[in-house]
Image (tube, rainbow, N blue to C red):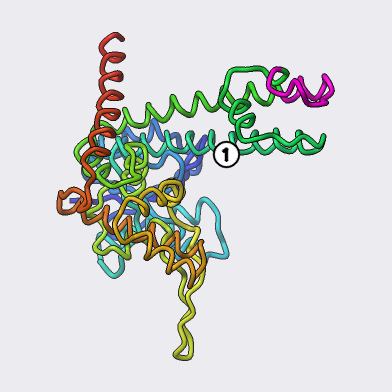
Amino acid sequence: MITRFHGIDRHKKYSTVSVLDRDGRETRFLRSCQMEAYLDELGPEDAVVMEASCGSFYWADRVEATGATCYILDPMRFRIITDSWNKTDRQDARNMAKALWVFLVTGEFGIPTVSKPSETIRTLRRLFASYNLLNRQIRMLKNTIQAMLTEDGVTVSSNDRSRLFKGKESVAEILADRRLSEVIVDALQIQVDLLRTITESKEQLGRRIVEASAPLDEQIRLLITIPGITPLTASAFLADVGDVHRFPSLRRMNAYLGLVPRCHDSGGKSRPGHITRESRKLSRTILTQSIYQTIKGTPGWERYYEDLKARRGSGRARIAMIRRLCGIMRRMLLQGEQFHWLKEKLYRRKLVEYQKTLEEHKKERDAA
């Protein structure tokens, strides 16, 4: 039986801890506690609650390894903290410990917690964070290069732009017939070299992401039966969703992914707004880049999209199609079924590339 209830307000260098007994009395308070040392005191009779922040899942694993029970609190939904006018480390720790005691002993109300994903999902999320950072850097560099050329009145064809961004030729060779000063050419070369390096790193990281998603192999093989969905895209969706069974409805999952619009209902009138940004946005970002291939490769989707685009605009139509696609992906994962309009030739090609990536990873791992 749990006899001690710990509220931990964790920070980078120290933590503030409040401990309550079974009667709800504070028996211990630590202002500057080191987590490593504190873990040695925990056991099966302890229950711990801490706020969701960077490193929370790691420390939750460490707490649970001692036999204690650990809850990760959602601070955005825990009104006692968000609405508190006296927000200090001491007060937060005591509020969390008290809420945990009420939840486990009296059962008067629950505490809003976040789901703790598996180690594979957490690894994928960290890798995708780096992947998105590289994407942003690539966009910034391309815009900078384009701006530098435009300022000197240089118009670059699509072929020359491809040579600049993806080729191996120097800037001086590609733009030999343009009137550019030596200083500008040198500055452009620095930007182009950096762009090519980051692009290569992004491609390498993309392969590592696919390799890291090997434990999700069965689900990935299902999802890539959809046109436009690659192993990388499937990994992004699975990294965002985690366990699809934890969502009781499609709307709950879409709300979690930020695909459901806000709704303002007053006086009998309902006014839908923009989609919420307070959500996981990886799937929405990745699927935006591949949704057009899915639309063109699925019977009936292109006409539906064009009709919706004419009525609601391209942005809302695109989100609507992504929402529909996520619903199909959810149903495929729950039922273990392939895409209804599967294209065998396209699927086999994606499967061969996917298997090749996994085999290369296996060879590298065996060699190491």
Q: Position of residue 197 (x, y in %)?
A: 56, 22
Q: Is disc 1 surrounded by few (<14), some (14 to 19) or many (20+) residues within 10 Å?
A: few
Query: Compared to 244, does 86 lie above or below?
Result: below
Using the image as rendered, state which of residue 349 and residue 90 is in the foreground: 349
**Does 116 sit left or right of 257 as displayed?**
left
- Which part of the image, by quadrant, shows the C terminus? top left
Using the image as rendered, state which of residue 114 and residue 111 is in the foreground: 114
- For residue 228, which quarter of the picture? top left
Going by the numbered disc 1, the residue's amino acid type is Arg
**What residue appears at the point 30 percent right and 54 percent down from the top-left corner?**
298
Query: Compared to 21, does 276 lie above or below?
Result: below
Which residue is situated farthest in the top direction here? 367
- For residue 357, which quarter of the picture? top left
Part of the protein shown in magenta:
173-188
Tell me the element at label 1.
helix
Q: Position of residue 95 (x, y in %)?
A: 43, 59
Using the image as rendered, state which of residue 363 and residue 164 is in the foreground: 164
**What residue appears at the point 30 percent right and 18 percent down from the top-left corner?**
360
Q: Is residue 54 magenta?
A: no
Q: Position of residue 208 (x, y in %)?
A: 37, 26
**What residue appears at the point 47 percent right and 45 percent down from the top-left corner?**
16
**Does 91 sit left or right of 165 as displayed?**
left
Identify the residue under disc 1: 136
- For residue 80, which quarter of the picture? bottom left
Using the image as rendered, state which of residue 103 and residue 310 is in the foreground: 310
**What residue appears at the point 74 percent right and 38 percent down from the top-left corner?**
147
Q: Position of residue 17 (x, y in %)?
A: 43, 46
Q: Is residue 182 magenta?
A: yes
Query: Compared to 6, does 359 lie above or below?
Result: above
